[in-house]
Amino acid sequence: MRVITQFRLKISGAIAALILLVILPPFLPSYWLTILTQMLIFGIMAMSLDVLMGYTGLPSFGHAAFFGASAYVIAILSTRYQVGFLGCIASGFLLSVAIAAIFGLLVAHAAGVYFLMITLALGMVIWGLAFRWVTMTGGDNGIAGIPRPGLGIPISLEDPIFFYYFVVIVFLIVLFLLYIFIRSPFGQSLMGIRESESRMRILGYNTWLHKYLAYVVAGAFSGISGILWAYYNGFVSPMDAELTASFEAFLMVILGGPATLVGPALGAGIIVFLKNFISAYTHRWLLIIGGIYILAILYAPGGVMELGKRLAKGGDNE
Amino acid sequence: MKKIILFAVIGALVIGMAAMPSPALAEKKPFKIGFFAPLTGHAAQTGRDMLSGLQVFLIEQGWKVAGRKIELISEDSEAKPAVALTKVRKLVEKDAVHVVIGGLMASSGYALMPYADSKKIPAIYAIMASDDLTQRKPGKWMVRTGWASSQPSHPFGEYVYKELGYRKVATIGYDYAFGWEVVGGFERTFEDAGGRIIQKLWTPVGTMDYGPFLGQISKDADAVFALFFGAGALQFVKQYKDYGLKDKIPLLGGGTTTDEHVLPSMGDEAIGIMTTLHYSQAIDTPENKKFAAAFKDFAGKIASYYGEGPYTGGKWIIEATKAIKGNVEDREKFLKALKSLKMPDSPRGPIELDKFGNPIQNIYIRKVERVGGELQNTVVKVYPKVSQFWTYNPDEYLKKPLYSRDYPPLKK
């Protein structure tokens, strides 16, 4: 019985989400459409961090580094060198993979709070580059005027609704790929490392390599969200790679529920929504968001997803 | 069943909130002004002063212009350009404002410009000072009523050489665009006049201990030019005295180093510092006295340039609105009125815009003095009608690079 209701819950959730994401948007006012787009972009970032935080048990404080790096690549290539769309996204993606591959060598042996500190420091390296390499990045002023790509078809991504659907498609693809990744034997062994790394090592797994690859995969998908972000805003600045950006992604995962994949995306949506909705009504909005974090940690340490499951369970008992 | 109802209610709420329609425009609907600035975080105090300045002016107007009610909608931009952009989108697309004003960080200014151009929404830059906003990267829908970072530095460089008689100056300032531009402008005109910059020190933004930097200052310097703001300014000026430098090497600076947003928190260590800006709370004109008194009444503190900027920006909007009889729905006409306006009576003096959209205005050379028990920036000299290009030819000026960490270079 339980299995069936859970399955039914999942299906109805998926259908509701699909309606919300695909059918509703054309009827939304343009402002809410851009907010929804923003939610999805941060959703991708939060899901990529979940691979590390939730599934592998490695809390990273430097995840915005990849996000920022790929956004900068788009900005620099498209405004300064007039590189086309495909060239831009390929370079942005490859750079974030390359950075993750290099940083991974430095972080993959660490765990727990050490992992946190090293990723924090490395994240600040990327921020420092963006801030200080002025001839390339424009420093604190950032880079403005990034054109949205023409896809070589009559549909222009300048139009918010088409850009939105473009982001939805990318989001769904990322969700699908990460889902497969997590369900794969490789993903299962990541969870094994999370539970007990020493046991996995004794069983013969190369845990270092597993952690390294997880870090690279997470970095790569974070890079994808950075690409979308650059096109979405038409602007990048060092703030995009800053510690607070990394920290916000961290909170999205916590609030949504680590190791649930959909949860962090939901967390991203909630945080983006709260930030933009509450702040319109009070200048003390940070207080309210802070309160929500505290309540979430006290009463729903597993995030919104756990809360949802608990609600569903409660329904079964009646 | 309960569950389904719950989902339905939540769904309806979400859709309902999202689909709240923006009010349509019609005759004599309120005139909506959108304001954005950091109202939380480290720059919150500055952002609130900006908001106060704008509110003081709108209160003076009785919240009415050309028969229309004025509605002010303020948003928190958190001193992050991406957030500023999101909030301006909200103001324009959801609240349907007719004009936006505000912004503190230069990066927000650059981020906003393409959006303002694409939506054809006039954007008033009352504080954001980065040079290139009205030089190498101007935007059509941006109207800067504030200043360009290097604008007050240009006359000061000449003043320091000719009237103060200093020949060798060391500089120290925040290591980012604003610092480079303020210091760079000073360096160029001081050296063009015949002086020499013998040392340039840069400190990271947020530095709270200037000891390591103060120890490096050359003993050969006739004076030190410093550029700081906020808590950094307080700390630097205090440490400058503690290290025994105050009595040996006179301190000069960019306007924010002794701006009224920090001056009341300073002590005698600030007395005698000479700085340059397009405003001083101590300007002795009826317009400024009226503004300064009204600001003090409203905000409970003395006015700084952060309050005066949006006050004058608000005045700019209202006078342009009057000039077109309140027909702000005609955006092109509104923009034209905003760009061609001349204001003889702002608190900081007469203002008009050059063809790049930057004010031509008075620059005040100020000296910190204690008058009636309070510190103030006494005006010692006024340079009238100063353009962002100073006395240089704009075309040649624009061919040179933007002031940066290494430009103009330190001459050996």
Image (cartoon, coloured by chain):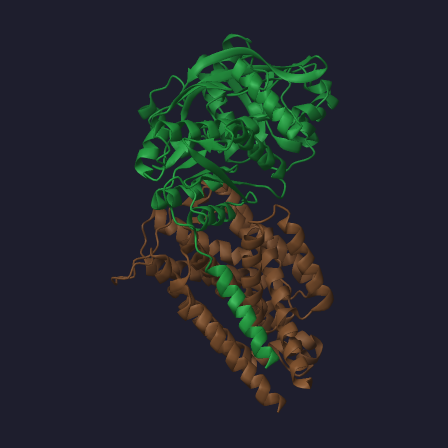
Q: Position of residue B147 (x, y in %)?
A: 46, 27
* Residue at 40% across, 32% down: B143
Q: Position of residue A186 (x, y in %)?
A: 56, 79
Q: Quadrant of residue A250?
A: bottom right
Report the number of discs: 0
Which residue occupies 58% across, 70% down? A263
Is B147 positioned to the left or the right of A105 in the image?
left
In the image, residue B63 above or below residue A76: above
Decide: is A317 above or below A163. below
- Front residue (pair B365, A202): B365
x%, y% of residue A73?
42, 53
Q: Residue at x 47, y 29 (%)?
A: B313
Looking at this view, is B352 or B221 the one in front?
Answer: B352
Tell me which chain appears brown: A
Q: Is residue A260 above or below residue A231?
A: below
Let me know if residue A219 appears in the view. no
Q: Chain B's colour?
A: green
Q: Position of residue B94 (x, y in %)?
A: 45, 51
Residue A94 seen from this side = yes
The answer to which image quadrant residue B216 occupies is top right
